[in-house]
Image (tube, rainbow, N blue to C red):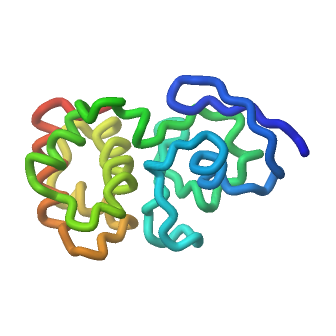
Amino acid sequence: MPTYTLNVNGQSHTVEVAADTPLLWVLRDTLNLVGTKYGCGIGQCGACTILANGVPLRSCLLPVVAATSMPITTIEGLSSDGSHPLQKAWIEHDVPQCGYCQSGQIMSAAALLQTNPHPTAEEIDSALAGNLCRCGTYLRIRAAVQSAAEAGGAL
């Protein structure tokens, strides 16, 4: 089995997996970073969103062989103690109901705030349109992203 070196959350990890193994499973099963969730497996729901070179990508579609050349950030990489402005805003606005989509939502929001620190409501909705929330907390999600932006919520 081949080995691959990944830069995840600022740390180097060497993994031994098949080249076509989705990064999602490497993160969860090999590196024990379980904050990134499996939702649909076809890149449609956004639960597995991570940042690769600061760009939100679906880790269920990204083969590990393609992830070796870029820094990867997972929800665990935002802060180890929940102190990132987006994480704080999520709690402040009582966003999670079931919570399943939240790490993907937060990672997409983090990418948005990195490139656009003061987004409008429409820009927030557009940037997070690919992240589905089964509980329908979209208004609270938008409010949380706006609060995080006011608090300086970029990575």
In depth, the one of 152 and 86 nearer the eye is 86
Q: Where is residue 61 in the image (x, y as percent from the top left)?
A: 63, 61
- In the displayed structure, 115 sits above or below 34; it is above
In the picture, measured across the screen, residue 28 lies left or right of residue 48, that is right
Q: Which residue is drawn at 52% across and 73% down?
A: 40
In what quadrant of the picture does the N terminus appear? Answer: top right
Furthest toward the right, the residue is 1
In the picture, measured across the screen, residue 26 lies left or right of residue 72, that is right
- In the displayed structure, 44 sits above or below 21; it is below
In the picture, measured across the screen, residue 124 lies left or right of residue 100, that is left
Labels in figure, total? 0
- The image quadrant of residue 5 is top right
- In the displayed structure, 21 sits above or below 7; it is below
- In the displayed structure, 122 sits above or below 108; it is below
Q: Where is residue 154 in the image (x, y as percent from the top left)?
A: 28, 32
Q: Where is residue 149 in the image (x, y as percent from the top left)?
A: 17, 39
In what quadrant of the picture does the C terminus appear? Answer: top left
Q: Which residue is drawn at 64% across and 24% down?
A: 12
Q: Residue at x 48, y 43 (%)?
A: 51
- The image quadrant of residue 136 is bottom left
- The image quadrant of residue 43 is bottom right
In the picture, measured across the screen, residue 147 lies left or right of residue 125, that is left
Q: Where is residue 2 in the image (x, y as percent from the top left)?
A: 88, 41
Furthest toward the top, the residue is 11
Q: Residue at x 24, y 74 (%)?
A: 135
